[in-house]
Structures are given as structure tokens and as C-alpha cells.
């Protein structure tokens, strides 16, 4: 029995003798099936030619990404706190070197995942760190391909983690799309980790909002307003997206507002 991993979205599936027939995440409108046909790997196969790289981003924050790039290519973000560490979003590869490197930073007390595209091998990561709980919004439950008791489905709009960080449901990209607020980040000015809820654009001066990023399906104005309203009530100055280098260093709330206005103009909604 093996836990197969979809090579397009990086989602690890429940144990099976044969690889699954299909990946519901990739068949959804927001993703795409590998043009060469649905394909699978396993952790052992992935580890042969891939490794993880730790990238310090600021005091208490480290990016963890896989090289060469695999599947969607996101980084996970490890937030260190005095009450234990939180891993935000996840990646598919985990190996002994990654576990050792994370242990040196204090291990993982909780995982929190924004939405089904950035799940990776989250249950494996939890196992490696004493079955740390994984917080995922209950709206995402139908998308989970490897159910496990370590997954804690939270409901409502806000969840406070015991490490002092808070999860906020914004919706948009997925109904349960969430962001993670780290109040101590950016020297105490607050950091928002955004997943795909708000996509930090390559110019690092804006964010975007999409139903589907690879298939270019925008979101309607009321949905943008809801996301903006949710995050404007939070205290933060810096934002980190899920790709390397996609960060808004400062004045992130102004960036959100400016970006939302620009976006709505582009989809024909007068401001
Ligand atoms: Zn997939
Ligand atoms: Zn996504």
C-alpha cells in the first residue's frame, strides 16, 4: 500500500494498492489535469531527485520549499513562537534532512492550511512532529484526499491558535480560503500569510484575487469586498504569498485596498 501524490497539485492521497484513477483537485475548474495524463509519484520516489531548502525570511519566519520545483511549487512558512511553532500551508516532500532542520528551529506544534491546493503531504508532516494538529476550514472537507484524525476542521470565521496566531476565513478562491495572522511578525507590526486568498503579484506592489489562477477566472466584486473587509479589520503591515520572493514588505493594508480598487475597475465595476 502506498500514499500516492498527484504530480500536478502535489496532494497526497490515502493509502491504496494501485494509484488512484483521478485527482478531484486537478479536475476542478480551478486547476488542470496534467496534459500528458494524470500522473502520480510517492514520497520515496520524490525524494530521489528533490530536496527541501530552508529560507530565513525575517526573525521567527522561515520558508521551506522543494528543489527542483515540484507540482504547484509553493513554499510552506514556519512561524516560530514562544508557545511552539506553526507551519502555514504545506509541501509534498518531507525527508530526514527537513525534519532535522525544522527540529533545530523548535519543531512544529500546529499546522494550518489555507486551501486544498497547498495541502501537500500534510499528514506526513504532522506524523513527523508528534501528530501535530492540522487546522483546516470545514468548508474544505470534501477536498481532503487523505482523511486523518489529526485534521481538525474548524468552523465559522475566526480560529485562535494556542500559539497566539489567528486564522481568518476570507472565502473567494475557495469558500473556506483562509489567511493566517501572526501579530508578532514584522517587529510587532503584524504579518499576514495569504496563501491564494490574496496573491502577491510579481511586482510586489499589489495583490490579486482569483477563482482560478492557472485558468484565469476572476472573482466578482462583492467577493473581493468581503475579502478586503475581513483583512482590513486585522492589524498587519507585511504580507507573504506562497511563492518565493512574493512579499509585500510594508504598508500591506494600503496595498490591499489599492489592489482591490484596481481589480474592480478592471472587471468593469465603477468605484
Ligand atoms: Zn492533483
Ligand atoms: Zn489555490
Image (spheres, rainbow, N blue to C red):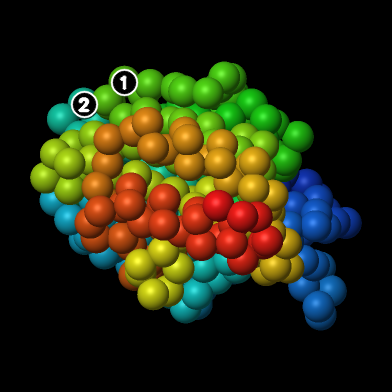
Q: Nearer the viewer, residue 170 or 166?
A: 170
- Compared across the picture, whether 163 is left or right of 258 comes to left
Q: Is mark 2 within 8 Å of ligand 2?
A: no
The residue that appears at 46% across and 23% down in the rendered structure is: 158
Residue drawn at x 64%, y 41% as measured from the top left: 222
Check whether the beta carbons of the residues at disc 1 and disc 2 lie within 8 A of each other. yes
Which is more toward the observer, 57 or 4?
A: 57
Residue 162: mark: 1
Q: Which mark is residue 60?
A: none
Q: Earlier in the sequence, mark 1 or mark 2?
A: 2
In the picture, measured across the screen, residue 79 lies left or right of residue 223, that is left
Q: Position of residue 56 (x, y in %)?
A: 21, 60
Vertical order, 31 against 140 (above or below): below
Quarter location, residue 18: bottom right
Rendered location of residue 70, percent (x, y): 55, 71
**Which residue sits at x=52%, y=68%?**
73
SS state under label 1: loop
Q: Residues within 10 Å of mark 2 (few under 14, many from 20)?
A: few
Q: Position of residue 118 (x, y in %)?
A: 55, 52
How far apart, in angstroms, are the residues tagged by discs 1 and 2?
7 Å
- Estimate the x, y position of residue 200 in percent, counting from the top left: 43, 62
- Give the residue pinned by disc 2: 83
Q: Is mark 1 within 8 Å of ligand 2?
A: no
Amino acid at each position: 500500500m502506498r500514499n500516492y501524490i498527484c504530480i500536478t497539485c502535489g496532494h497526497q492521497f490515502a493509502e491504496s494498492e494501485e494509484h488512484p484513477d483521478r485527482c478531484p483537485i486537478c479536475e476542478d475548474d480551478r486547476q488542470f489535469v496534467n496534459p500528458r495524463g494524470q500522473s502520480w509519484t510517492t514520497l520515496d520516489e520524490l525524494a530521489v531527485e528533490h530536496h527541501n531548502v530552508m529560507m530565513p525570511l525575517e526573525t521567527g519566519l522561515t520558508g521551506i520549499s522543494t528543489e527542483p520545483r515540484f507540482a504547484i511549487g509553493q513554499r510552506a512558512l514556519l512561524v516560530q513562537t514562544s508557545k511552539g511553532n506553526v507551519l502555514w500551508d504545506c509541501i509534498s516532500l518531507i525527508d530526514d534532512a527537513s525534519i532535522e532542520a525544522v527540529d533545530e528551529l523548535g519543531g512544529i506544534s500546529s499546522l494550518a492550511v489555507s486551501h486544498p491546493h497547498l495541502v501537500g503531504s500534510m499528514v506526513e508532516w504532522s506524523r513527523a512532529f508528534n501528530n501535530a494538529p492540522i487546522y483546516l476550514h470545514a468548508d474544505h472537507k470534501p477536498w481532503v484526499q487523505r482523511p486523518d484524525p489529526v485534521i481538525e476542521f474548524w468552523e465559522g470565521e475566526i480560529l485562535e491558535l494556542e500559539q497566539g496566531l489567528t486564522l481568518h476565513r476570507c472565502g473567494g478562491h475557495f469558500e473556506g480560503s483562509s489567511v493566517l495572522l501572526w501579530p508578532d511578525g514584522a517587529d510587532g507590526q503584524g504579518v499576514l500569510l495569504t496563501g491564494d486568498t490574496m496573491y502577491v503579484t510579481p511586482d510586489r506592489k499589489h495583490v490579486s484575487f482569483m477563482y482560478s489562477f492557472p485558468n484565469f477566472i476572476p472573482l466578482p466584486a462583492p467577493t473581493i469586498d468581503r475579502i478586503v473587509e475581513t483583512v482590513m479589520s486585522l492589524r498587519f503591515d507585511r504580507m507573504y504569498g506562497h511563492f518565493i520572493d512574493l512579499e509585500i514588505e510594508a504598508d500591506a493594508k494600503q496595498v490591499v485596498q489599492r489592489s482591490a480598487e484596481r481589480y474592480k475597475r478592471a472587471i468593469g465595476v465603477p468605484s
